[in-house]
Image (cartoon, rainbow, N blue to C red):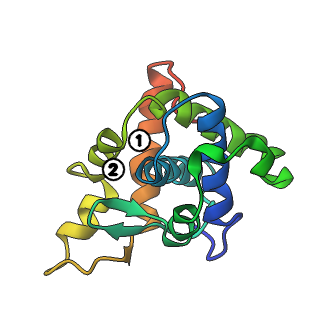
Amino acid sequence: MCKDKYKYLSTDVAIYIVALANKERYIITLTKAMKLLYIVYGSYLSVTKEKLCESPEAWPFGPVFPVARKVLLDKKLEEITMEDVSKELKRDDLLKNIIDATLSTFGGYDSEELTDFSMAKGTPWFKVTRNIRGVDWGRNIPDNDTSSFFGRLVVEDRENKNTVSC
């Protein structure tokens, strides 16, 4: 289903999400950025069958992209602007559409609501953490589960004529 390689670095995509959230005046935190990145990752994967960036890991409070998290920890998120986004990402119309749709749907959610969404029963994170005795935090969340989960959301959304992703 998915290539072993990915198109972008999670850090670059996360910066794009944070910059657009700031531009659209959504409150953004590190946790919220990780959850929005996960939604974008899953939507992109379900649409293209290709990895957008490195895979998310199952952490105690939901899916996390460790490399992006580490970089964003050292930044003042409110100071990230569209000027910080790489030109390559800005030219990717599919990615732009997915990020726009994700923010228009989930941008008003707070970190806790997005964490609850990403950890709900039946989600890929839930499956990974419930299938391991003594949970091994930091385990990759399988792309097959992520693609299937977000693929259902995209199909349901198209049937309801809303725009959650492309």
Q: Amino acid at mark 2?
A: Ser
Asked if residue 154 shows in the view, the reply is yes
Amino acid at dot 1: Arg
From the viewer's perspective, tell me whether residue 29 is left or right of residue 13: left
Residue at the location (85% across, 51% down)?
87
Rendering coords of residue 157 (x, y %): 46, 28
Q: Residue furthest left?
A: 133
Whether label 1 touches label 2, CB < 8 Å: no
Q: Nearer the viewer, residue 37 or 154?
A: 37
x then y, percent, for residue 109: 39, 33
Secondary structure of the residue carrying numbered label 1: helix
- For label 2, the SS is helix
Of callouts 1 and 2, which one flags the residue occurring earlier in the amino acid sequence? 2
Where residue 152 is drawn, which disc sits there? 1
Residue at horizontal 23 percent and vertical 68 percent from the top:
129
Camera-side mark, 1 or 2: 2
- At x 39%, y 49%, the residue is 149
Residue 83 position within the rendered picture, expressed as x and y whole percent measured from the top left: 80, 45
Q: Circle 2 sits on which residue?
A: 118
* Above or below, comparing residue 28 to residue 56 in the picture: above
Quadrant, the C terminus: top right
